[in-house]
Image: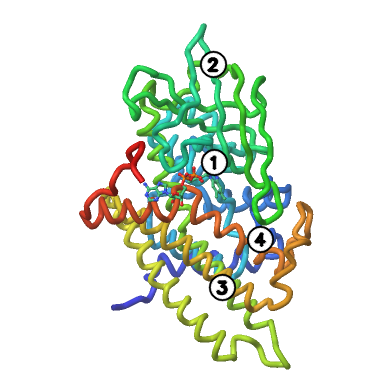
Amino acid sequence: MDLTLSEPYQALQAEIRAFVADYGHLSPKLGGGRKRPDQKTLDWQKRLLEHGYVGRTIPQEYGGAGRQPDIMEASVIASEFARANIYAGLTNQGISMLVPTLLEVGTDEQKRDYVGPTIRGDIIWCQGYSEPGNGSDLANAQTKAELKDGHWIVNGQKIWTSSAHYADMMFLLCRTEPNASKHEGLSYLLLSMKSDGLDARPLKTMTGRSEFNEVFFTDVKVPETQIVLGRGKGWYVANITLKHERLMLGDAGKTNARLEQLISLLSKTEIDGVPLIRMPEYRDRLLRLQGEVLAWKAHNLRLLTEAAQGIDSGVKRAIVKYGGTMLGYRLSSLAVDALGSAGLPYESLGEDAEDDDATTWNIDYMYDVGLMIGGGSSNIQKNIIGERGLDLPREPKFVAGMR
Ligand SMILES: Cc1cc2nc3c(=O)[nH]c(=O)nc-3n(C[C@H](O)[C@H](O)[C@H](O)COP(=O)(O)OP(=O)(O)OC[C@H]3O[C@@H](n4cnc5c(N)ncnc54)[C@H](O)[C@@H]3O)c2cc1C
């Protein structure tokens, strides 16, 4: 197989290398990314948008570069940013999950109002899906919205809502059709986090930081037009968003970038003057992970090819979420081992801890455990792969009184 890049892709590669040489020093630090983006990150995002390195295939009228999807271009851009160890642009629930959902099923007005500001990082979104009694069983969501005088009146509670403490907007899955079946009774609303009656209370994760929240709704008013696709279509829309969430969480470009960071860490960390990357116990683990990341990139390219051909990748996306988050966790596990005693400063990881190498890897290591649960737990992904991909019998349903 000839893996040489053809001429247009070589030109793109050269263009990005020139960009990195000119502007690379302005890149924000890698890692973290679970706080509201600072001005440096917003400026960088704007620069990437101007060059079409992010938002590349989003139509120009909605703030993107309006290019045709091209998997080789996407792959060259991701590889060059990973190789240069610089920030490849914001990924968050708005950019990676809501924007593609609105582009697929939003109204023209919703696309105009939200896509541009979201990809610029000016609007930060959070995802209101999980509830205290309904996480894996998402279709059972009980937060309700009733239509009265041109507004949805929302009452109920969400939980584990990442970023809600600094988000501007929420996409919310709620029950609007109480008499319809479980799946057909849901709708998908877009609402301001500044709404009266909305109370977001931060919860700490084991990183020691407040990364998600419980959110309470008491008669929160949302304009009637802030519904996506229509009444009772929430389950359909929520699944479009979930499809993109699973791809975001297992993203091969990000995994590759973390591998490059790990190689850099193992190269500069020494014991008795010998870099860890030269020591067999570290090199063996690294090589194994490197092989898996390569396989991961190939799987990702297959999905991108199918997407470009309009083929629904179906269950292969669940594999991305399941495998990508496991791989991410193993990458950060090796980093934490390599950091030795610096890999254990659990007590010191306060809200404002400086994001140096050790802090970033430590936080990633702990947060990666959460990523195997968020967006649908690994168990649920395995059910999907087994039942829908391998035609295995369905999991027995829990029956009250059964032990
Ligand atoms: C870091 C993090 C960030 C998150 N961010 C968000 C967010 O922004 N917005 C949001 O809405 N939610 C968010 N969540 C919530 C997440 O989506 C839920 O935690 C997840 O879907 C699991 O739901 P649950 O916690 O209610 O667990 P449960 O559904 O109660 O599951 C408990 C355990 O039982 C297992 N289980 C449940 N059902 C089955 C089954 N049928 N077969 C086999 N095993 C099963 C699960 O795998 C899990 O191990 C986040 C979670 C984490 C950890």
Circle 2/circle 4 CB separation < 8 Å: no
Circle 1/circle 4 CB separation < 8 Å: no
Circle 2/circle 3 CB separation < 8 Å: no
What residue did someone put label 1 on? 94
Q: Residue 123: which quarter of the image?
A: top right
Question: Is 103 placed above or below 377 here?
Answer: above
Q: Residue 167: which quarter of the image?
A: top right
Circle 3/circle 1 CB separation < 8 Å: no
**Image coords of residue 87 (percent x, y):** 62, 60
Residue 77's tag is: none
Mark 4 element type: helix
Q: Measure the alpha-carbon separation of dots 2 and 3.
A: 48 Å
**Image coords of residue 317 (percent x, y):** 36, 54
Q: Earlier in the sequence, mark 1 or mark 4?
A: 1
| Residue drawn 22% across the image and 55% down it | 392
* Kind of residue indicated by mark 4: Ile
Q: Earlier in the sequence, mark 2 or mark 1?
A: 1
